[in-house]
Image (tube, helix red, strand yellow):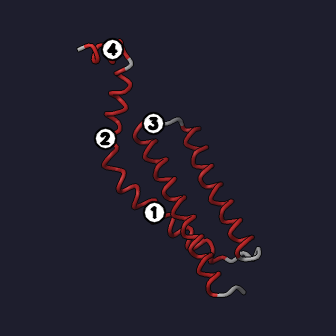
């Protein structure tokens, strides 16, 4: 059994890992809604973020808790991940229409040498 300080450090690391994963997943969701990324790219982005979180959890368990796995370790990580995902998604959702129009303007600026005509005016 570890002391109270180490347990608090483990809890902080697990919470930070969950928060980072929730933020990454909400950013991936925002980019997908704004510019419609490819399904394969979205899968690999989500896989990379969740896989990195799994690696971080495994390192936390190995180095901070001497390899002893407890079921409780999934609770703070999952809770903070869901909380972070929901909150950041709520903050980013109003920005989606603006990003869609900015992406459309950027795509249209490439057609017909629009930038050169705009600069020469």
The reply to whether callout 4 and callout 3 are in contact (CB within 8 Å) is no
Residue 36, horizontal then vertical, whole percent = 45, 36
Dot in front, 4 or 3: 4
Residue ID for mark 3: 36
Q: What element carries label 1?
A: helix
The earlier-in-sequence mark between 2 and 3 is 3
Q: Is mark 3 on a helix, strand or loop?
A: loop
Q: What element carries label 4?
A: helix
Image position of 12 with respect to 96: above or below: below
The tag on residue 84 is 1
Disc 2: CA contacts within 10 A as few (<14), some (14-19) or many (>=20): few
Residue ID for mark 4: 116
Q: For the residues marked 1 and 3, what is the alpha-carbon distance in whole angstroms?
A: 22 Å
Residue 63, horizontal then vertical, whole percent = 73, 71
Residue 68, horizontal then vertical, whole percent = 75, 77
Disc 3: CA contacts within 10 A as few (<14), some (14-19) or many (>=20): few
The earlier-in-sequence mark between 2 and 4 is 2
Report how many numbered discs are placed on residues in the image.
Answer: 4
């Amino acid at each position: 059994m570890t002391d109270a300080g180490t347990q608090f450090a483990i809890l902080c690391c697990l919470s930070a890992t969950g928060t980072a994963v929730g933020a990454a997943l909400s950013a991936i969701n925002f980019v997908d809604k704004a510019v419609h990324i490819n399904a394969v790219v979205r899968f690999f982005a989500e896989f990379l973020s969740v896989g990195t979180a799994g690696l971080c959890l495994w390192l936390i368990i190995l180095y901070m808790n001497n390899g002893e796995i407890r079921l409780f370790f999934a609770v703070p990580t999952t809770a903070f991940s869901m909380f972070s995902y929901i909150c950041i998604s709520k903050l980013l959702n109003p920005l989606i229409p603006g990003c869609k129009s900015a992406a459309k303007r950027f795509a249209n600026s490439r057609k017909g040498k629009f930038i050169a005509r705009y600069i020469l005016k």
